[in-house]
Image: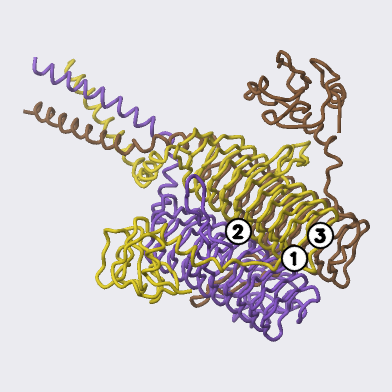
Chain colours: A brown, B purple, C yellow
Amino acid sequence: MKKSVGEIAELVGGVVVGDPDVCITGLNGIEQAQPGELTFLNNPRYAHHLETTGASAILAPPDLDVLGKTLIHVKNPYAAFVSVLHSWAEPLKVTLPEGIHATAVIGSGVTLGEHVAIGPHVFVGADSRIGGGVTLHHGVSIGPGCTIGDDSVLYPNVVVRERVSIGARCVLHAGAVIGSDGFGFAPFSGSWFKIQQIGTVVIGDDVEIGSNSAVDRATFGRTVVGRGTKIDNLVQVGHNVQIGEHCVVSGMSGIAGSTVIGDHVTIAAQVGIADHLEIGEGVTLGARSGVAQSVKPGKVMSGYPLMEHQDDLRVLAALRRLPDMPRRIRDLERRIQALEENLHGTAEDDKR
Amino acid sequence: MKKSVGEIAELVGGVVVGDPDVCITGLNGIEQAQPGELTFLNNPRYAHHLETTGASAILAPPDLDVLGKTLIHVKNPYAAFVSVLHSWAEPLKVTLPEGIHATAVIGSGVTLGEHVAIGPHVFVGADSRIGGGVTLHHGVSIGPGCTIGDDSVLYPNVVVRERVSIGARCVLHAGAVIGSDGFGFAPFSGSWFKIQQIGTVVIGDDVEIGSNSAVDRATFGRTVVGRGTKIDNLVQVGHNVQIGEHCVVSGMSGIAGSTVIGDHVTIAAQVGIADHLEIGEGVTLGARSGVAQSVKPGKVMSGYPLMEHQDDLRVLAALRRLPDMPRRIRDLERRIQALEENLHGTAEDDKR
Amino acid sequence: MKKSVGEIAELVGGVVVGDPDVCITGLNGIEQAQPGELTFLNNPRYAHHLETTGASAILAPPDLDVLGKTLIHVKNPYAAFVSVLHSWAEPLKVTLPEGIHATAVIGSGVTLGEHVAIGPHVFVGADSRIGGGVTLHHGVSIGPGCTIGDDSVLYPNVVVRERVSIGARCVLHAGAVIGSDGFGFAPFSGSWFKIQQIGTVVIGDDVEIGSNSAVDRATFGRTVVGRGTKIDNLVQVGHNVQIGEHCVVSGMSGIAGSTVIGDHVTIAAQVGIADHLEIGEGVTLGARSGVAQSVKPGKVMSGYPLMEHQDDLRVLAALRRLPDMPRRIRDLERRIQALEENLHGTAEDDKR
């Protein structure tokens, strides 16, 4: 694909500084870009890359100019880059050919929508309903009694266990497991007695779930992931958890059983949330937070123990000074004792 | 399924407060329950839900009463609920039909017990022995020379590598990998030299292993998971680790190479245990513990650094007050210096 | 296999203390070893095992002697043991028979090198190039347009998405996913807009990637794992990350988007590294480090917040004393106030 700088400026509503006829054949990050490629500068912090980038043109904020570089001035260079990226990327979608591969195994009573693409060695259990336009890549496993909404894409080796419901336009990445048993065992005379996990999982429309993540089915009732929520790789969602709509859960985070998370919550990476908590709407939890208490709506929290993010930053700063504190406190204690004895002595002297 | 409150009370040995003829058609948590459903209240902390729950009947401790609610008084409401759940759940078991699916590939010399159910696209390597009543779901991969004990269930896409032994009545959840190479490399002139991992893994009877967890094979000898131990999702068990019997390992925890864990140990979520340690029988490790030292039997520990759980709670509480400490110490140092100078001055004055 | 102690001593350049004709039939750890087996003692900390080990012979440092035990004195007992292990292990390699299993599905335009072994239910997408001597175990999924270098081994159910390049002699463990979409979403009027991930992943030669780990493809450009780097289980490598050569990334660690890691970096277990950072050549990051800042070459760092490892050890030690500090500081404040009042009073008295 090829576009001139002038064409790209028109696409993003930007203003060309330099030659509008420069020909762009690819897109890349500012440090990696080569001649012929378009890049973007969003953060003035990286302005020094402007002079060394190999890019032939740069989407940049209106107040930036660099001698000898072709720029496209635009208010939000990142958003502009994303939209160019999209206009560029459209033919890249990986598609399976429509139809059912000869090696796929489709159970009895399965309903298939129009234009489904079912890859090699896929299994669809009895009585499941696969929506129109759904793509099931190689090795995908759908248990009996499931529903997969229209236009969802399940990448290779995804496992969806029995009776789980997946919404429309969902993307489940390779190796994700939806509907495995919740981790429920009751202690019983020195051993662990399995509590049957007879519930299910309901995933809303437009949800994305990352590679090798695991969403457990409910003990009874449903584990829920709300519409529009995006979950990264290697995330665990425990049994009976309810995640709201349009949330983000970053990589390697875990949410324990029965916790309820509101809409528009942002959970950064490697966070752990204990069971039976409520995380209010619009909450942000910083990376590595350890959450052992419910959080009110709108709060920006982080740390372990969890606290307001501003306080956590102060704790992190103070931790660097912690090693000297015991010595300084001991020193103070010695000095104050000396003073007290001295003063007591003085007082005694005074009495005499 | 339908049961009257009277029938359920009889089943759990409880006493009905209210109408024993109320008809129960389902089970649910106290917050989710609707009319027609039975729920339970175990923790007095949640007693406020009693008044708002939609449940038609509630299993509750004998000392609890709520006007206008049908209760079943019983000593342990949770245990009672579990047993009702079980009596309810029995027909829900997901079963593959007995026999070997036409698309499964069974190696030479494989021994199959009676009543095995082997799903589509399963592979069983040469000379493996599959016990009676075993279920291998879609896409399961069993390497050559393995043993799978009677009545074990392996969910879709589980991988068991060569020469691994799995006990009877085990449950391996989707995507779990048993017997991958231990992470062993020796530094050798600027690069890493792979140490062949020629050992194996032995999993005892009645073990459960969660989705996408990984149990590495031993460098030499065996990695062991003892009888009755339950492991959650996304857990890593390193090479040559030995886990005792009837332990619990919660989600996203990791145990590094050669560590030995006694019987009846409870490991909460997101714990990390370093290599070559000994964790004594009956130890409890709190969520997010970082364990870099061996732990004596019976201890309840948590935190990073690891300490007695009571001490860790005090550290967590004190951390919230940490940010003010440097300022307070500096302030004390200034004041004490002023006092010292003052007093020294006074002393000097006295001399004059 | 069988070797005499004399033969083994010759192999490792060691000196026999005891009977060189003792016959060794296996290898094992010092605690597990039985008669007939060889073991090693590397760390004097474990010297007490020398007297209780069942091993028939022990590789040990020259200064160690134990009455009645057959020893092989050698400078580096561990290295010696590894080399014996290798000479022993050679016939243990798990191999698939050469050729393509009848159930594998090979796309159009695929190029296959000589001596490839392709297992049951494998899928190779159109136009991919599979090098000579490559082994693809059961259930492996290779997307279209991929390259797999010579002699690489992909264990069961590994997923390599479209257009990814894997080097020669790589080992990808079961369930690993290479090339899943980077986690990129732009906020757009209350929901999340997916940024197409049109880049790819390039894995160098001699790389090993652990079970159920996930390496995301770049948004644009490439995610890179350098030659000779070894990655453990359940690790996440974010989109556009670049990892240098001969690094080690231990289990359950995560590296967020666009971070650049130099050569010879060692990352211990459960580490989290934020996005857009630079980790210099030769850096070591301790277990559980939380890395939110770039790190200069050669540094040994750990902790959260990240600091020099020596400082972190001091912080960990001081944390144990933290709970008493608020009380001690309060006590000091009270005492100093009393002194100040006292002294002020004295001064006032003096004035009178």
User: The numbered mark 1 sits on a residue in which chain?
Assistant: C
Q: Residue C157 at what x, y percent from top left? A: 70, 61
Q: Residues within 10 Å of mark 3 (few under 14, many from 20)?
A: some
Q: Which residue shows up at 78% across the image and 27% down it?
A: A36
Mark 2 vs mark 1, foreground winner is: 1
- Residue C50 in sight from this viewpoint: yes
Q: Residue B48 at what x, y percent from top left? A: 61, 59
How far apart marks 2 and 1 lie (CA) works out to 34 Å
Badge count: 3
Left or right: where does residue A206 sit relative to residue B158? right
Mark sitting earlier along the chain (3/1)? 1
What residue does disc 1 label? Answer: C99
Element class at badge 3: strand
Q: Residue A299 at what x, y percent from top left? A: 61, 40
User: Which amino acid lies under the numbered mark 1 shown in the image of this protein?
Assistant: Gly
What residue does disc 2 label? Answer: B234
How far apart marks 2 and 3 lie (CA) works out to 32 Å
Q: Residues within 10 Å of mark 2 (few under 14, many from 20)?
A: many
